[in-house]
Amino acid sequence: MLKVESLESGYGTMQVLWGTNLEVKRGTITTVLGPNGAGKSTLLNTIFGLVKPWGGKILLNGMDVTYYPPHKKVESGLTIVLEGRHLFPSMSVTENLILGAYTDRAMERLNETLELVYSLFPILKERSEQLAGTLSGGEQQMLAIARSLMTNPEIVLMDEPSQGLAPKLVMEVFDTISRLKDEGLTILLVEQNVFASLEISDYAYVLNEGRMILGGTIDEIKDSDEIKRVYLGI
Amino acid sequence: MPFFEQLAGNLVYGAILGSVYGLSTMGLSLIFGVLRIVNVGHGPFIMLGAFTAFWMFTLFGIAPVISISVALVLGLALGFVVFFAVIKRLINAPELSTLLATFAIGIFLEEVAKFIWGPDHRGYSWDIGSIDLSITLIPYSKILAFISSIVIAYLLYMWFQKTKLGAAVRAVVEDSEGAAACGINVGRIYALSFAIGIGLTVASGVLVTLFVPVGINPYMGHEYTLKAFVIAVLGGLASPWGAFYAGFIFGLIENGSYTLLGTIPGVEPFSLTRFVAFSLLLVILLIKPTGLLGGESK
Ligand SMILES: Nc1ncnc2c1ncn2[C@@H]1O[C@H](COP(=O)(O)OP(=O)(O)OP(=O)(O)O)[C@@H](O)[C@H]1O
Ligand SMILES: [Mg+2]
């Protein structure tokens, strides 16, 4: 459902992505692994449109969306959970969620989505009047995911959703992500947490210095020498 | 008791003038809050509002309170033009570029105004009587200015809090990337906020004409740029409401200090009020760099 072909982008004159390829199949979880500074966030932000593509193609359901600005991506069913959450800290949990349903696409199903979100994250219902900035780290991450669901997406890009969380909460976040897949959502995940993310993924890629050096089904990836050597230490 | 009567009278006047100061700074704070751009060409937009009021009154006999809406519409239109012609290209530019560009816009407006209307002071008198508060005489025109400022600020507040577009502006202020992830067209919010900011500023210029005994001229804006900076910092820079309250505080301090300074022999109080105002700015910046009413600024 999402296809990225020879994508190039960067900041100023510094190129970060050097012809990156990627495919995400509907209803799957696809993970992008890679060392710090490999360009994982740049890849997601370029797909979403926060960073302008220099070249290459981004296809969403076969449609060329390469140069769509972010709000048009959201209207087309693609959204992102940014690295570092990017909530609206001095607004309440409810206000954050309602803003997630900003587009026409999302407004149509506002009540259903809100119900789904509250059933997935009961804690957010309890905290609905609390200011987002006063939530704990784990709750903030849940809210960031919940807000992305409010856009009524088909596919969600997630940039290190387990970052900075205690181990117990990390498991909770991964649990939530696989439940979202069960709800029919497609997910493109970027993670540092290799073991946990390979556990829930169907496909995985390895990005290094702006190029995909490996890609395949989860079993292929787990078996590859590269992964064994670099990440699993076997 | 003449001193206390005089002080009380000046404080009433300070509060009234302060409401206009507040309104004239809201646009500056709104633009800074949303776009993170400091509009150093702020004052000349106030000047344009003042000329709008002047010409509406002298050519058509239209009262300033009515001209406010004309100025607002003109300001909105001008705001969109300036945004798409200049500001749009500067959103992520280095600070120096935006400072130079807005400075240049200010000078450009002043020179165009001078070219069309000449450099001399002009004035008009809108006399609709006064109310006697026993301590002081307040013209109705100034009371109307006071009410207008509060009504405009309140309407803007309601728009921010109660409408979807208002919520989108607040979202962009808090986190523009987060807003984009919600599907908010951030570029459009930038354009709209800039236009509203300029609209408010030009509208406030109409009310300013009711408080300038020497009249208006193309360079009158400088004083208001300076005052607006003090007030904006006082109010926490990024918050239009903070700016509005801070305008009151500034008006009270300015006029209160006028009375107090007047008691010192050999001191010419008017020339010192500005000194007091900027000393205040320095002190605030030293104690609380995020502004008196501001929270943590990013
Ligand atoms: N906004 C930016 N401006 C300039 N350079 C940037 C910006 N964001 C990232 N970079 C640079 O681009 C390169 C790739 O960064 P990116 O954030 O995409 O890596 P990453 O794989 O997400 O790393 P991490 O695992 O630390 O999140 C790095 O060299 C980084 O310094
Ligand atoms: Mg990253």
Image: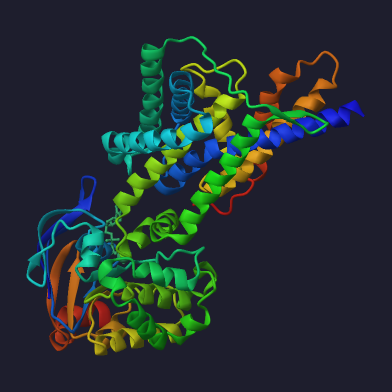
Relative height, residue A87 to residue B83 (above, below): below
Seen at 39% across and 46% down, the residue is B193
Q: Quadrant of residue B214?
A: top right
For the N terminus of chain B, the quadrant is: top right
Relative height, residue B68 to residue B221 (above, below): below
Q: Residue B127 or A115: which is nearer the viewer?
A: B127
Seen at 46% across and 22% down, the residue is B51
Q: Is residue A214 left or right of residue B293?
A: left
Q: Residue A115 or A29: which is nearer the viewer?
A: A115
User: Would residue B283 be visible to someone looking at this image?
Assistant: no
Q: Is residue B125 left or right of residue B48?
A: right
Relative height, residue B218 to residue B84 (above, below): above
Image position, residue B108 (x, y; %): 36, 21
Q: Is residue A94 left or right of residue A14?
A: right
Q: Residue B199 or A147: which is nearer the viewer?
A: B199
Q: Quadrant of residue B111?
A: top left
Image position, residue B285 (x, y; %): 62, 40
Relative height, residue B39 to residue A51 (above, below): above
Q: Quadrant of ligand 2?
A: bottom left
